[in-house]
Amino acid sequence: MLGTGGHIQQFIDSTVLAGVAPYVPMRGSGLGKSATLHTQIGGGKQRTRLHESAEKHNRDNPGSGKIIWKGPQARLLYYGVVYVDPVYKAAGFPIRGNGGEVERWVSRKGVRKVPSSPERLFNFDQSRHPKAGRLWCERYKQDHLKELAAAAQKEVDAAWNS
């Protein structure tokens, strides 16, 4: 109940995953789904097929209380700093369609980007998630840690009294 992967850890993991969702940037649904896919809730069995690296992490850290966002841009979005090409100082290069509209952005192959200087932060679209932005987990904890602790204590009390 109280140990690694126990009922209380499952409760905390699930509560944090649900509560932090409005703080996570959402252009598509990939980043939000990433946390559900790569987090071992309470150390229990996953309901979804995981990538090998996530399976290894979850075997090594069952019910560790770690929420994991994984994907090509997860770290970049989490810290919210714009990374640029070291030579051209551009975050990317637009590929335009016939009508002149930007179809997609590309970077030079094999070039490792560096943090922009002076540091520029992402301007997150908040139309779908008004609280979306960088360092989403820290901001969620700042807003809800006392509530989370009280809810977890209530779960502990209920478990001990049953």
Image: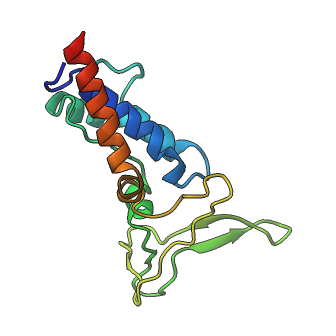
| Side (left or right) of 157 relative to 106 | left
Question: What residue is drawn where x is 53% and y is 43%?
Answer: 30
| Residue 31, horizontal then vertical, whole percent | 49, 46
Please state which of residues 37 and 90 is positioned toward the viewer in this rendering.
Answer: 37
Q: Give left or right: position of 74 versus 23.
A: left
Q: Position of residue 110 (x, y in %)?
A: 38, 68
Tell which of 120 and 7 is nearer to you.
7
Quadrant, the C terminus:
top left
Image color mode: rainbow
Residue 83 is drawn in which quadrant? bottom left
Report the quarter where the N terminus lies.
top left
Q: Residue furthest right?
A: 99
Residue at 27% x, 37% y: name it.
53
Rendered position, 137 above or below 103: above
Q: Is residue 84 left or right of residue 100?
A: left
* Residue at (37% x, 79% y) in the render: 115
Given residues 4 and 1, the one toward you in this image is: 1
Compare residues 58 and 152 and report the one nearer the observer.
Answer: 152
Q: Is residue 35 above or below residue 128?
A: above
- Relative height, residue 102 to residue 91 (above, below): above
Residue 115, compared with residue 72, is above or below; it is below
Q: Is residue 157 left or right of residue 19?
A: left
The answer to which image quadrant residue 134 occupies is bottom left
Decide if residue 43 is in sight here: no
Residue 89 x, y percent position in the rendering: 47, 86
Residue 108, position as x, y percentages in the image: 48, 72
